[in-house]
Amino acid sequence: MTRLLIVAAALLVGALASLPARAALKPFNAEYSVRYQGVPANAQASLTRTGDNWTYVMTIGNVAASMHQATYFRERNGVYLPLGGSDKLQYLGQRRSITTRYDWRNLQIRWTGDAKPSRVGPIPLQAGDVDALLLQLALVRDHENGRAMRYRVTENARTRPTTFRRAGIEQVSVGSRTVSAVRYVQTGEGKTTTAWIAAGIPVPVRLSQQENGRETVRLNMTGWR
């Protein structure tokens, strides 16, 4: 196992060295208006840095429910290495909290907290893995670099291959501004996810998910700084 880890580390270092340079990550704050199943809510997203580690947080809520998600990672020459994550949900007096841990020494991912016994793992960890939140930053990164948008997303003790394809350019309102955004679409398991990405803005300016042809979630950016 030790030799395998050394080989894996060497391959990862080689991959990092061969990647093109990109603009450095910078802390930011963003606000969104949200509609979930037709119900309005608001969302805030932020990226902060502590030493070599980054934290990307998104909070969505209204008077009835709230969801707080966070992903922790390191960045090396444009590669995002997930370290952990948390998912907290509160609604109708109920609370749920799940923590994700990425073990790079043993190449495993585990979930703890209120996860179902069948969804605690471990599952194998691979270089390039992202969770659903870190995927937002990876989409912008790969849009900027002109890379293929192919990922392995980890969630609920399973992984799923995810590929976004370019589907045109649209004018999107961000608060009082109108920006030109490239639309990317991913379809699978009866769901369609769409992300709109605009130059110079570090996260998608709009996100939408449809199930069986009906939109269930939409986030529209209203401002960022």
Image (cartoon, rainbow, N blue to C red):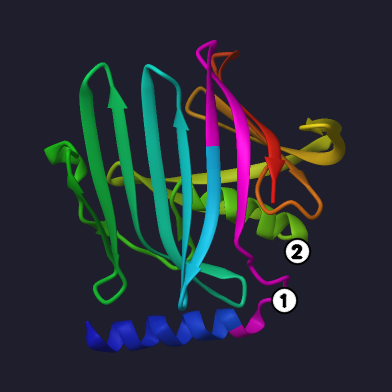
Asked where in the image residue 109 lies, by quadrant, the reply is bottom left
Amino acid residing under circle 2: Asn
Q: Nearer the viewer, residue 140 or 60?
A: 60
Q: The residue under label 1 is which amino acid type?
A: Pro
Circle 2 crowding by C-alpha within 10 Å: few under 14, some 14–19, many from 20? some
Name the residue nearer the viewer: 83 or 188.
83
Q: Tell me where residue 85 appears, x and y as whole percent.
A: 35, 54
Residue 19 falls inside the magenta stretch: yes
- In which image quadrant can residue 45 be found? top right
Task: Check the picture and name the quadrant holding the N terminus.
Answer: bottom left
Residue 91 percent across, percent down from the top left = 29, 21
Q: Which mark is residue 145?
A: 2
Q: Position of residue 131 (x, y in %)?
A: 43, 50
- Who's the residue at 62% across and 71% down the image? 78
Residue furthest left in the image: 117
Q: Is residue 78 above or below residue 87?
A: below
Determine which residue is flagged by label 1: 20
The answer to whether mark 2 and mark 1 are in CB contact below 8 A is: yes
Magenta part of the chain: 17-43
